[in-house]
Amino acid sequence: MQIKLVGESTLRQKCPLIDINELKSNKKWYESLIFNMTEAMNNNLGIGLAANQVGYGMRLFVTAFNAVPNIYINPSIEWFSKEMVMMEEGCLSVPGTYLRLERPSRIKVKYFDIDDMEYKKVDLFGLPARVAQHEIEHLDGILMTDHAAERTLKLQNQNYGILL
């Protein structure tokens, strides 16, 4: 599974919701996609990966913290904390680029759970909250570089030749 890089149109498209009836009818296919996304994320030393980063235009992302995968289908942020935190972020679709971005420290996410086949809500804080916000922005066609003025971009590896 190849990760799409900045400049590819799939990264700029707002991803539609996954039809839950279709997911239920094709659960094995979605489980295979999720497995492959998780492997691609791990193989590239990532901690989050949105479906459109691997060419699938649907509202789905995976994360992994301490080797525990988390799957978010049709995620939406229902609440943001007022407390903001500045932290450096990277992105598998923008290799070699790291930005200090300010984001809410806590969020509440509603998502569909493929195992229990129902919608759930989870409170996230710290790094999991940051990664979820980053991945949900991917699903909306927003890249982390959209938050930064050109002069704040700090390219760590000039060998990619990527135009931001």
Image (spheres, grey):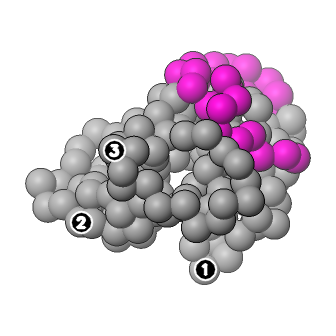
Q: Secondary structure at mark 2?
A: strand
Looking at the image, residue 101 lies above or below residue 19: below
Which of the two labelled residues, at mark 1 and mark 2, occupies the earlier sequence position? 1
Which of the two labelled residues, at mark 3 and mark 2, occupies the earlier sequence position? 2
Image point 56% across, 46% down: which residue?
Answer: 72
Pick the residue in front: 30 or 2. Answer: 2
**Residue 21 sits in which quadrant?**
top right
Instruction: Name the outermost residue toward the left.
Output: 82
How crowded is the residue under tag 2: few (<14 C-alpha within 10 Å), some, or many (20+)?
some
Looking at the image, residue 24 lies above or below residue 159: above
* Three-letter residue code for mark 2: Val
Looking at the image, residue 125 lies above or below residue 67: above
* Three-letter residue code for mark 1: Asn
Pick the residue in front: 49 or 59. Answer: 49
Task: Give the number of the mark in front: 3 or 2.
Answer: 3
* Residue 163 visible somewhere in the drawing: yes
Q: CA distance from mark 3 to mark 2?
A: 19 Å
Pick the residue in front: 15 or 35. Answer: 15
Label 3: which residue?
149
Pick the residue in front: 22 or 37. Answer: 37
The percent coordinates of residue 49 (x first, y second) are 64, 51
Q: Secondary structure at mark 3?
A: loop
Q: Is residue 3 magenta?
A: yes
- Residue 72 horizontal side relative to residue 134, left or right: right
Q: Are marks 1 and 2 in contact (CB under 8 Å)?
A: no
Which of the two labelled residues, at mark 3 and mark 1, occupies the earlier sequence position? 1
Say the numbered circle drawn on residue 85. Answer: 2
The percent coordinates of residue 162 (x first, y second) are 66, 45
Magenta residues span 1-27
* Residue 34 visible somewhere in the drawing: no
Q: Is residue 119 magenta?
A: no
Task: Give the number of the mark in front: 3 or 1.
Answer: 3
